[in-house]
Structure formats: C-alpha cells, structure tokens
C-alpha cells in the first residue's frame, strides 16, 4: 500500500469511528488528558446601572458570544459620562469585567448606583480643588474608575468583595456611602 492510500485508509477509519461512536477519535487524546467541560454557546456578562446624577439607566449584556458588544459598550459609556460636562469617554472594559465579578461576589441583584464614572479633566480639577479626597491624576479621567454602591448590599460587604478580587484599587468612603474601584495597580484606602 502506498503512502496516499495509507493516509486515505487512516482518515476513513477515523471518520467511521467518529460516526459510529467516537471510539477512534477518543484514542487520539492522551490517556491522562482531562476532558474539557463543554462551553456554553453564549456565556453573556450582564450588568445594570443607574446614574444617581442623571437618572440614566443601563441593563444588558456587554459581553456575549466571546466578544465585547460594541453597541452595549457605547450605551454604558453614555450612562457613565461626566454628568457635569456631558463629555463621554470609552470606559475600560476591564472595569466592566471587575464590576461583573463584583456583582456575583457580593450577590448583588440591584443595579450598581453610579456616583461617579468618567470625569473630564476640568471636572476632576474642580473636585480636587474642593476636596482632599480627589486625586489630581484620577483614573476616573481615563475611564478606568467608578464610585458605586448597591441597594441591598451593605457597604462593608461590597468593599470586602472588591478587595477579595485583588484586581485593582479599592477605596472605602463610608461617610459618603460608596466604594471606589479601578483598573490600576492593586491598592486600598
């Protein structure tokens, strides 16, 4: 038997094994391999927000079918805009991923209440001039930070869940009733 016929026969045997019951296919996997769990066709990531300053809301799947949904991201950018100037900026998708993880970790069922999302440089400078608690180079200005609370979730529990993620900065503002999370280096205050 020449090489071409040998390859045809081997291919036919594999195909027949797959059709009949997969026995021939299974032998291609190493004996010590761990079978992978099947992936869901659409492992959507859901979020919901209400902006406490504008009343704007968002509820939807910002990630679906293994990709960020661009229309959904645009809607989130609008809800998280600088409420003082109306300026919109792209929000870091990693921040949305952190919020999605935090939602599950804190067992939050209500929307995130946005105290502050994106801030223009002008808005941030004005806030920094009025308060020592506002960083002059805040990650809010890059769309990489958000100040939030969630109805039905105690603020210390929300903070602790964010800290346990070990995914960026976490600030705790008990007297103002919100926490800050960002996609910067891991730190806390």
Image: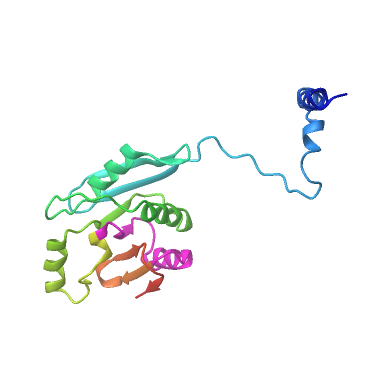
Along the horizontal axis of the image, is 102 left or right of 57? right
Along the horizontal axis of the image, is 160 left or right of 89? right
> How far from the left and from the top, in percent, is residue 87?
16, 51
Along the horizontal axis of the image, is 158 left or right of 138? right
Screen quadrant of the C terminus? bottom left
> How far from the left and from the top, in percent, is residue 115?
24, 58
* Near-viewer residue (76 or 24): 24
**Point 54% across, 34% down: residue:** 41
Residue 39's quadrant in the figure? top right
* Near-viewer residue (130 or 186): 186
Asked if residue 126 is among those painted magenta in the image, a careful observer would answer no
Q: Is residue 117 above or below residue 76?
A: below
**Point 12% across, 62% down: residue:** 122
Residue 142's quadrant in the figure? bottom left
- How many numbered callouts? 0
- Which residues fall within the magenta stretch? 142-168
**Point 39% across, 59% down: residue:** 153
Q: Is residue 110 above or below residue 167?
A: above
**Point 16% across, 62% down: residue:** 121
Asked if residue 146 is among those painted magenta in the image, a careful observer would answer yes
Screen quadrant of the N terminus? top right
Which residue is situated farthest in the front direction here?
A: 2
């Amino acid at each position: 038997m020449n090489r071409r016929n040998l390859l045809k026969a081997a291919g036919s045997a594999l195909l027949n094994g797959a059709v009949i019951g997969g026995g021939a296919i299974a032998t291609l996997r190493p004996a010590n391999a761990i079978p992978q769990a099947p992936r869901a066709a659409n492992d959507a990531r859901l979020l919901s927000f209400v902006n406490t300053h504008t009343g704007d809301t968002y509820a939807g799947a910002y990630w679906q079918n293994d990709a960020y949904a661009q229309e959904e991201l645009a809607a989130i950018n609008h809800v998280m805009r600088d409420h003082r100037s109306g300026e919109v900026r792209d929000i870091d998708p990693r921040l949305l991923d952190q919020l999605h993880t935090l939602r599950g970790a804190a067992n939050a069922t209500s929307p995130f209440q946005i105290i502050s999302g994106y801030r223009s440089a002008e808005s941030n400078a004005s806030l920094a001039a009025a308060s020592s608690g506002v960083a002059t180079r805040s990650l809010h200005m890059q769309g990489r930070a958000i100040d939030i609370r969630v109805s039905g979730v105690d603020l210390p529990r929300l903070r602790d869940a964010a800290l346990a993620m070990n995914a960026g900065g976490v600030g705790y503002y008990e007297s103002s009733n919100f926490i800050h999370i960002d996609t910067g280096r891991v730190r806390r205050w």
